[in-house]
């Protein structure tokens, strides 16, 4: 069996800041710093309590930019949409944190599939996993 993380509510896949920080630290093997973008001041403020932050506007980097940063090193930041949904670190974090792993508009679950081949279908953020066995293919036969 193979495990894949999927979102099971309307809204879209997303990790909580706590889960995302944990993911990058485990994946990279080093400390990761969280910064929240402040639209009014156009700067980034360091997040000191990741447990309480629920804002989707949090960015992560391996560089400590101090308490407030005017610019953010985009080449040093990470995007959760680059994470394969079958990534064992991601699967482990979702299983470990349960509801605490959910992003602002997400309800993440770990699904088990029998094949190493899958794709995720999305309808307004509600996702389903498609596998070759789950699709009834129409085959055109040559005459």
Image (cartoon, grey):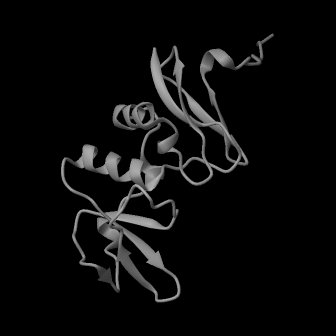
Above or below for 121 versus 103: above
Residue closer to the observer: 60 or 101: 101
Please give the count of numbered marks on the rendered protein. 0
Quadrant of the snapshot with the C terminus: top right
**Residue at point 23% right, 62% down?**
62
Q: Is residue 70 left or right of residue 123?
A: left
Instruction: Residue at 38%, 79% (x, y): give it.
Output: 44
Residue 71's spot in the image, x, y percent? 34, 83
Q: Quadrant of residue 37?
A: bottom left
Looking at this rendering, what residue extends furthest in the left direction? Answer: 30
List x then y, in percent, for residue 43. Answer: 41, 84
Q: In this picture, is 111 found above or below 74?
A: above
3 left or right of 136 in image: left
Q: x and y percent of residue 4 in the render?
A: 49, 29
Q: Residue furthest bottom?
A: 41
Residue at 23% over, 49% down:
28
Q: Nearer the viewer, residue 49 or 86?
A: 49
Residue 128 horizontal/vertical position (percent): 66, 32
Which quadrant would residue 51 be assigned to in this image?
A: bottom left
Residue in front for this viewpoint, 109 or 83 = 109
Which quadrant is the N terminus positioned in?
A: top left
């Amino acid at each position: 069996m193979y495990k894949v993380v999927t979102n099971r509510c309307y809204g879209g896949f997303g990790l909580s800041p706590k889960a995302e920080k944990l993911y990058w630290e485990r994946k990279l093997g080093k400390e990761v710093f969280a910064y929240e973008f402040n639209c009014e001041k156009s700067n980034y403020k360091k997040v000191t309590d990741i447990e309480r932050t629920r804002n989707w506007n949090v960015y992560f980097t391996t560089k400590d930019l101090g308490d407030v940063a005017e610019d953010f090193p985009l080449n040093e930041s990470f995007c959760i949409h680059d994470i394969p949904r079958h990534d064992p670190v991601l699967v482990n974090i979702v299983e470990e944190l349960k509801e605490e792993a959910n992003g602002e508009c997400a309800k993440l679950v770990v699904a088990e599939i029998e094949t190493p081949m899958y794709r995720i279908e999305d309808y307004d953020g509600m996702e389903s996993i498609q596998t070759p066995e789950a699709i009834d293919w129409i085959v055109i036969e040559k005459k």
